[in-house]
Image (cartoon, rainbow, N blue to C red):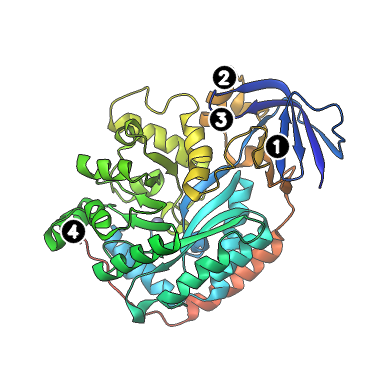
């Protein structure tokens, strides 16, 4: 167990009292924060780090992504969602290999760690390979093996095997790995399958990560086919009875919001994807007054192109203020909380996302000395509005360095780039076929 002492730090704790400390000390014992400023006199320091006034804050959580989809970055641009799925993404994914998922995830991990993201909620295929990547790269993750509930189209697994995957993965890698069930969505999965998934989740105490209510067309289709909105359908089938994380939830009515609030559902908004595909704006103010936990995600690089949570943070503020004509929405440190603390909560890492004694030693050091920060009148404003991924200097998860002075310590970046390129070349040459169709009545 290594004892570390950070000195001369600006600490943005994101704790309940919004504490910010200047010229502060932070003591870490092994994988846990021991003290802020009141350092015990008998604390034996093995590593002493002079932060020189830079910011230490909780690491960020990407609460909805498909990490391996770095392979689809820039592959399906300028298309409506139906054509994006049917003509590009599902064709390419028909040639997906476990190796593509592993190397694609590691490439994503490089980008995420370099940008201060310490954990991600992943919804994809061959998740055993993602589990291996996370075990090696030192991040935290909530893994959901995506299934459609139609036996012939599952990728790399049977539905019962996803249950075994959750059992085996939950708590692995010294607790850095969590797992849950990953039915794709109410628009792709049959109702009876969703109901069975909900029953298993409740029986086994598993969470659920699912997409829903992304477009107005999906809601219209759902009302026509089931007489229920997508959220009502999920509630009716029992999918909100556990720790549930819903990506997007853009087109929700007030009744839907009451369901989401009463059931304690976690919502993830992915602003750049929402804007890029003209999907709409998540009703964040209406969610916040109902105490719904709203986190932030990048979605996959196949849609958002970048896994940059600082960008998502700013887009969240800007889209909300624009849509609801309110310049005070998501004020102060609220965007940072969404990206860090709310994300940790959505993924089930309740001991992370805040700097306080007894919490996990999950933190990033942000170098605010670059010209684009100057002058720093207000450290919160500087972090929210000025930070770029390259300003993240150090990243620590559970007391272990993942990046130190911009050097990655758990991933061989050159090897990842090379192997990713090799596997991608094979994938692009493989035959592609359409194995399913997305239809929201708008294409
Ligand atoms: Zn998604």
Q: Determine the CA span between mark 4 and mark 1.
A: 47 Å
Residue 253 seen anywhere in this rendered image of the structure: no
Ligand 1 near label 4 (Cβ, under 8 Å)?
no
Q: Residue at x 39, y 54 (%)?
A: 242
**Residue 39 spot, x, y in % from top left:** 79, 27
Q: Is mark 2 within 8 Å of ligand 1?
A: no
Q: Which residue is mark 3?
A: 14
Q: Earlier in the sequence, mark 1 or mark 2?
A: 1
Residue 308 placement, left or right of 243: right
The span from disc 2 to disc 4 (Cα, nearest Å) is 46 Å
Q: Residue furthest top?
A: 377
The vertical placement of 198 against 16, above or below, is below
3 or 2: mark nearer the eye: 3
Eye-nearest disc, 4 or 1: 1
Identify the mark at residue 33; answer none if there is no mark. 1
Among numbered discs 2 and 4, the one appearing first in the sequence: 4
Mark 1 residue CB less than 8 A from any atom of ligand 1: no
- Callouts 1 and 2 close, C-beta under 8 Å: no
Instruction: Say if 38 sits above or below 104 in the image.
Output: above
Q: Earlier in the sequence, mark 1 or mark 3?
A: 3
Front: mark 1 or 3:
1
Q: Is 269 situated above or below 319? A: below
Q: Which residue is mark 4?
A: 222
Of circles 1 and 2, which is in front? 1
| Separation of marks 3 and 4 at Cα, in angstroms | 39 Å
* Residue drawn at the location 46% of the way across and 41% of the way down: 312
Element type where label 1 sits in the image? strand
Say which of 265 and 301 sits in front. Answer: 265
Residue tagged 2? 378
User: Where is the C terminus found, in terms of image quarters?
Assistant: bottom left
Q: Specify few, some or many for label 3: CA neighbours under 10 Å numbering under 14, 14-19, or 20 or more.
A: many
Q: Earlier in the sequence, mark 4 or mark 1?
A: 1
């Amino acid at each position: 167990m290594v004892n570390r002492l950070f000195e001369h730090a600006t600490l943005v704790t994101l704790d309940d009292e919004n504490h910010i400390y200047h010229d502060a000390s932070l003591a870490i014992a092994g994988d846990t924060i021991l003290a802020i400023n009141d350092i015990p006199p008998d604390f034996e320091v093995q590593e002493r780090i002079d932060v020189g006034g830079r910011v230490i804050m909780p690491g960020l959580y990407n609460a909805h992504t498909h990490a391996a989809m770095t392979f689809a970055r820039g592959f399906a641009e300028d298309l409506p969602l139906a054509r994006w799925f049917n003509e590009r993404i599902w064709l390419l994914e028909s040639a997906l290999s476990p190796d593509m998922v592993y190397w694609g995830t590691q490439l994503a991990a490089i980008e995420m760690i370099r940008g201060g993201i310490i954990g991600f909620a992943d919804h994809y295929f061959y998740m055993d390979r993602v589990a291996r990547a996370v075990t090696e790269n030192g991040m935290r993750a909530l893994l959901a093996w995506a299934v459609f509930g139609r036996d012939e189209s599952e990728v790399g697994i049977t539905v019962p095997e996803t249950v075994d995957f959750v059992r085996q993965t939950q708590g692995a890698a010294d607790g850095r790995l969590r797992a849950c069930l990953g039915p794709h969505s109410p628009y792709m999965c049959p109702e009876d399958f969703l109901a069975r998934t909900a029953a298993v989740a409740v029986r086994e105490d598993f969470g659920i990560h699912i997409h829903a209510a992304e477009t107005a067309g999906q809601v219209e289709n759902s009302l026509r086919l089931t007489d229920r909105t997508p959220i009502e359908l999920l509630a009716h089938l029992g999918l909100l009875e556990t720790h549930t994380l819903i990506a997007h939830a853009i087109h929700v009515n007030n009744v839907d919001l009451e369901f989401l609030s009463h059931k304690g559902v976690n919502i993830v908004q992915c602003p750049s994807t929402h804007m890029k595909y003209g999907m709409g704006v998540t009703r964040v103010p209406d969610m916040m007054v109902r105490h719904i936990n709203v986190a932030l995600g990048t979605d996959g690089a196949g849609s958002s192109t970048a896994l940059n949570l600082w960008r998502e943070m700013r887009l969240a503020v800007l889209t909300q203020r624009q849509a609801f004509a309110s310049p005070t929405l998501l004020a102060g440190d609220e965007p940072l909380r969404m990206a860090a603390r709310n994300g940790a909560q959505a993924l089930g890492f309740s001991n992370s996302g805040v700097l306080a004694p007894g919490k996990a030693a999950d933190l990033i050091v942000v170098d605010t000395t670059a010209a684009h920060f100057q002058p720093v009148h207000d450290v919160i404003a500087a972090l929210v509005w000025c930070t770029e991924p390259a300003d993240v200097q150090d990243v620590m998860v559970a007391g272990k360095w993942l990046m130190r002075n911009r050097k990655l310590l758990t991933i061989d970046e050159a090897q990842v780039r090379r192997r990713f390129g090799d596997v991608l070349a094979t994938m692009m040459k493989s035959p592609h076929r359409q194995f399913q169709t997305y239809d929201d009545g708008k294409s």
